[in-house]
Image (spheres, rainbow, N blue to C red):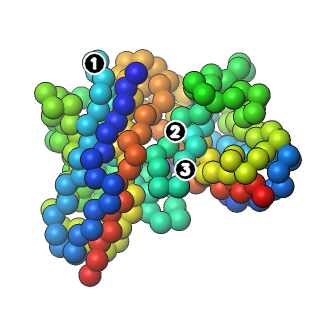
Amino acid sequence: GAVVSQHPSRVICKSGTSVKIECRSLDFQATTMFWYRQFPKQSLMLMATSNEGSKATYEQGVEKDKFLINHASLTLSTLTVTSAHPEDSSFYICSARETGTGSSGANVLTFGAGSRLTVL
Amino acid sequence: AQSVSQHNHHVILSEAASLELGCNYSYGGTVNLFWYVQYPGQHLQLLLKYFSGDPLVKGIKGFEAEFIKSKFSFNLRKPSVQWSDTAEYFCAVNVAGAGNTPLVFGKGTRLSVIA
């Protein structure tokens, strides 16, 4: 089945530094990937929709200059948390849907294992 | 915009008890419906999905869910839970027929199954 890999799974950084999280579709191509953020004991909140070859679409309230998304190829999207602060500590999850599997939105998203960011 | 409501934050059951987790969504159009499970320390996995057709859908590990359009509900059920079903369960929806639409998740229900 489709597999989405995220790296790193855990990262600890100092306040003010930038952290890059990679999301790769291992055995399929994805023109669109979604980035979610999950706070402890809460649901997944959509941060942005990453589109291959174009700018990401950010949800209301998500700072695009803070959370830089680059979708450079059909198998890789990156999320960079710039000038991270302790309040950015969270669990970041990406998901992807295989390209060319229909336009109904009915196809299943495959999720990565998530990346836990801790900012000291 | 669509939204998803899961009624129970934490459910505790004994093994072999029956399970029903509530999920209601808010959206005026046609949606696709999903239940995902997140076992401790693991990533989200799809349990089952509804796109169209028979409103009673069966998923993996003995789970099923019923779509009741008039109630905007998609409750998850299992007749007899096991200790290994301890996990966080998320209901999610996206808009049908709208291309690459993201999933909107409920807040999740934590299920604890005790021996």
Q: Mark 2 or mark 3, which has the lower sequence index? A: 3
Taking depth in this image into account, of B19 and B64 the one nearest to the observer is: B19
x and y percentages locating residue A66 in the rendered image: 75, 33
**Subunit of label 1:** B
Q: Amino acid under label 2?
A: Met
On the same chain, marks 3 and 1? The answer is no
Relative to A85, residue B83 above or below: below
Alpha carbon distance from label 2 to label 3: 8 Å
Circle 3 SS class: loop
Where does label 1 land, which residue?
Answer: B28
Pick the front one: B71 or A105: B71
How crowded is the residue under tag 2: few (<14 C-alpha within 10 Å), some, or many (20+)? some
Q: Return the chain for callout 2.
A: A
| Pointer 2 with pointer 3, Cβ within 8 A | yes
The residue carrying pointer 1 sits among few (fewer than 14), some (14 to 19) or many (20 or more) residues within 10 Å by Cα, namely few
| Distance CA(mark 1)–CA(mark 2) | 21 Å
Q: Which residue is mark 3?
A: A39
Dividing the picture into quarters, in which one does residue A48 lie?
top right
Place of residue B48 in the rendered image (x, y in percent of width and height, measured from the top left): 31, 46
Badge nearest the viewer, 3 or 1: 3
Image quadrant containing the C terminus of chain A:
bottom right
